[in-house]
Amino acid sequence: MERKKNKQPKLHVKSGDMVLVIAGDEKGNTGKVLSIDMEKRRAIVEGLNKAKRHRKPSAQSPEGGIFEIEAPIHLSNLMVIDPTTGLPARTGRKLNENGKLERYFKKTKREKVS
């Protein structure tokens, strides 16, 4: 019997989490995760990793110009911040009483509010 592959991988980061960047040019900065690209394993963090994009004038933006957008950051460079301590913490998963997986912080053993 062939094993079923998980369609959507379980990640340590979700949209809406506060994260700390632990590697790269933005190391030490914090921000909120806006979206996640599952295939590329990258996340867009609010206000971090800005990139400039040159846009031609169009019907939507008649002026055009140079715009700054947030570029994606690899998930391995992000660490979730525990809201109780305000420090970055590792996360794990465990089954709750309903039989669903829920995330928790390994150090404080506190269940993560998603």
Image: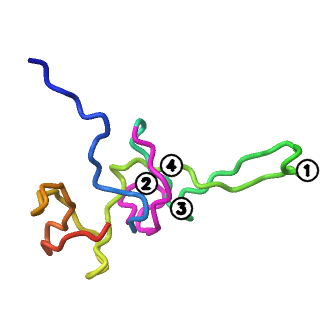
Specify the label residue 62 is tagged with: 1
Specify the label residue 72 is tagged with: 4
Question: The residue tagged with tag 2: helix, strand or loop?
Answer: loop
**Span of residues in magenta:** 19-38
Which one is nearer the viewer's eye here, 65 or 97?
97
Amino acid at the residue labelled 1: Pro
Quarter of the image that includes the C terminus: bottom left
Using residue 36 as the reference point, say whether residue 92 is left or right of it: left
**Earlier along the polypeptide chain: callout 3 or callout 1?**
3
Amino acid at the residue labelled 3: Leu
Question: The residue tagged with tag 1: helix, strand or loop?
Answer: loop
**Earlier along the polypeptide chain: callout 2 or callout 1?**
2
Q: CA distance from mark 2 to mark 1?
A: 35 Å
Mark 3 lies on residue: 48
Question: The residue tagged with tag 4: helix, strand or loop?
Answer: loop
Using residue 37 as the reference point, say whether residue 68 is left or right of it: right
Q: CA distance from mark 3 to mark 1?
A: 27 Å
Mark 2 lies on residue: 24
Viewer-side label of 2, 3: 3
Which one is nearer the viewer's eye here, 19 or 3?
3
Question: What x and y, as percent, mark residue 111?
Answer: 19, 70
Q: CA distance from mark 2 to mark 3?
A: 11 Å
Query: Residue at point 32% right, 70% down?
Result: 81
